[in-house]
Image (cartoon, rainbow, N blue to C red):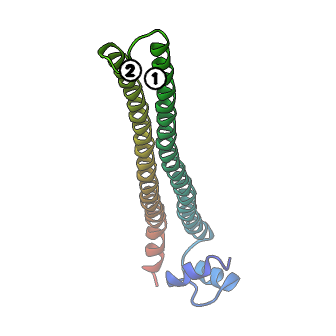
Amino acid sequence: MCFFAPLLGALGIGGAGAGAAGAAGAVSGGLSIGSIFKIGAGIFSAVSKISQAHAAAKAAEETARQQDQAALDAIEQGKDESDRRRRAGAIEASRQQAGLAANGIDVSGPLGLDLLNESFEVTGSDAFAIRENAVRRGRQFAQQAANSRTEARSIRSQALFGAVGSLLTTASKVGPKFTSTQAFK
């Protein structure tokens, strides 16, 4: 009962006494035991909503942190993959150049340069596409992280309104009983 004593004191019920004395004062002051339990249930409901929201918001923030890290990882992986593609393209161009020279084609002539330039263009285009796709994936993860942060803020505000709603509902149920008993004093 000492949990309810500060509440009862704040309502002006039962004086400064705590525990059974406060509850006895509340009952003799006009509130029934049922009303006291309704008040306790309303407070418990409000605290519970806030506590659950805190946990859910914390989970959403952790999800956002992981999504931010995934965005950075996706971009970094794209850079690495793009660099590997460029290196593989350079090796392929070297082989192609050696093959042209082995077949008697002048690699510094128009045909040799056209073939090598085409290989470099394809490699560059592939590497650019790899990097751009990685950036897009990173942006998607970053957007998901922003959505998770918005969800966390929404959860917190919903909890606040839910808790206030619980307290107001409790007050609307208990208040008329309290005022009607106080009118006779």
Q: Say which amino acid is labelled 1.
A: Ala
- The residue drawn where x is 56% and y is 65% is 47
**What residue occupies the far left of the structure in this picture?**
110
Q: Residue at x 61, y 76 (%)?
A: 4
Q: Position of residue 138 (x, y in %)?
A: 44, 41
Indicate the position of residue 135 as horizontal and vertical percent values.
40, 39
Q: Nearer the viewer, residue 169 or 106?
A: 106
Give the residue displayed 59% in from the left and 90% down from the top. 16
Secondary structure found at label 2 = helix
Identify the residue under disc 2: 116
Which label's residue is closer to the chain start, 1 or 2? 1
In the picture, measured across the screen, residue 44 lies left or right of residue 115, that is right
Pick the residue in front: 33 or 168. Answer: 168
Question: Residue 86 at what x, y percent from top left?
Answer: 46, 32
Quarter of the rendering occupied by the N terminus: bottom right
* CB contact under 8 Å: marks 1 and 2: yes
Q: Which mark is residue 79?
A: none
Q: Amino acid at mark 2?
A: Leu
Q: Which residue is mark 1?
A: 93
* Depicted 128 relative to depicted 55: above or below: above
Q: Nearer the viewer, residue 95 or 177?
A: 95
* Count of all numbered marks drawn on residues in the image: 2
Mark 1 → mark 2, Cα distance in angstroms? 6 Å
Task: Identify the residue shown where x is 37% and y is 26%.
Answer: 125
